[in-house]
Amino acid sequence: MIEKLNAAFATQRAAFARDRAPSLATRLERVQMLRHMVIDRRQPLRDALAADFGSHHPWLVDLMETGPVIGRANHFIAHLPKWLAPARIALGPEHGSSHGEVALLPKGVMGNIAPWNFAVESALIMCIDMLSAGNRVIIKPSELAPATARAVADAVAAHFPADLLTVVQGGPELAQAFAAMPWDHLTFTGSPRVGRLVAQAAARNMVPVTLELGGKNPALFAPDGVSAELVKLFLSFRTLKSGQVCTSPDHVLVPRAQMDEWVALACAGWSAAYPAYVGTDQCVGIITQAHFERLTQYVAEAKARGVRVEPLNGDAPDAAARQFPLTLIIDPPADLACMSDEIFGPVIPVIPYDSIDDAFAGINAGETPLGAYIATHDTILARRFIDQVRSGGAAVNNFGLQGGHVALPFGGLGNSGQGCHSAKQGFLNYSHAKSVFWGASDSIVHAVLAPPLSELTGMAAEGIYG
């Protein structure tokens, strides 16, 4: 497979050399090709995700995997003409009729290492940004979702020439070789641990990287936010893909005096929605047995330490189906594994706090999360949270949509990543902004710099200081 990667890279490098500045029309056509591909392959992609997860409702495939690719394509098709249009930049009267320009040019050949949890969406959605910027792309899907990797590879091969967009499949050995290639830009979506290794490998070739990682995303409930409506909304986002989402809230911070109320609202709201959840087709399976056992160990450790554990609905895990119930771990001690690991599953620590300032300080004391959430109707408090709590993105009275809207950039900070995709910022991320100076003969600056230095040069130097 490494030979296939090398051949694909050489093919795309040669193709880019033949067309270094594709036109707007060409870029739009390529984005349309990807949009049509996803529409055409709707059912095979649904089937593949169900095979990999064991259970994955087709509506969730449409809403969280293929639909976002279509939505981003539509957004980029609508806005790319404006984003790509050259802008004449005034440089000041001292430059006469000279003017500036920022030319947005392709970087070249992009590498995209996709994760298993969004095995379609993350493999393809960044390609909208990359193709819009005029680049060529090679995708490395996750080997933990093999059926989806094959389905994506088949779809791409049927709709795109390999010198524009292609897929290479393989395990850890291929991933290591992929990260070490001399890309013009490399994107990785996954864990902070692996992200560090990817960044180190890319640095050897001075490759710019976009890292979309994760972290322990907090959901802070202010005293006025503890309501049936907002607790149920939290649960609805927390259980999407059984919590196997990088922007999913990882844990909840609740005023100490309202802990029992919050837990009661969660139990009542979930029971009303699902008298039984495990065993239904709406409970997305955990991706592998190893991940299922990891979640089981979080719960077992809490019980062994005497911590209160509430499996909502009273559901029990189903190891054969890899379905895990929504489970609260209430007021866990800080040394439990669920308090340090990114949980990435339907186990939710519910943590008390004594003051808003304590809650803010506690969040900021940890690694920077990809998303941070607050439930409150106090707009002043919400603004404080946005401004003072460090995170890649944030949401008020919502628990993840900031990471999925086509008009908003998606990216982390520090331990949760660097760079971004989506929206105009994503297009710019995969473009080279080339500064251009169009000189004119009536520029005074030309005369100031002409040798030998003159009285005019001195006047200009003195003029800097007023």
Image (spheres, rainbow, N blue to C red):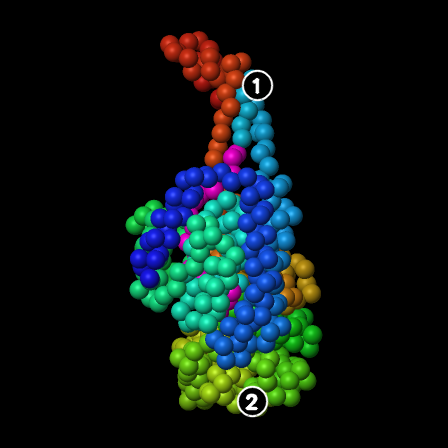
Disc 1 marks a residue whose amino acid type is Ser
> Picture coordinates of residue 248 (x, y %)?
54, 69
Q: CA distance from mark 1 to mark 2?
A: 74 Å
Residue 393 in magenta?
Answer: no
Q: Which residue does the image show at 58% across and 34% down from the upper left?
A: 86
Residue at which label 2 appears: 315
The answer to whether 169 appears left or right of 328 in the picture is: left
> Picture coordinates of residue 183 (x, y %)?
38, 49
Q: Secondary structure at mark 1?
A: loop
Q: Which residue does the image show at 48% across and 32% down from the upper left?
A: 435
Residue at which label 1 appears: 97
Residue 250 is at least partly visible in this image = no
Q: What is the magenta range?
A: 102-120
- Is 9 situated above or below 436? below
Q: Which residue does the image show at 50% across and 54% down from the upper left?
A: 160
> Picture coordinates of residue 118 (x, y %)?
50, 67
Disc 2 marks a residue whose amino acid type is Asp
Point out the residue furthest to the front here.
Answer: 158
Could you tell me how many numbered marks the image carries? 2
Q: Quadrant of the N terminus?
A: bottom left
Label 2 near label 1: C-beta < 8 Å?
A: no
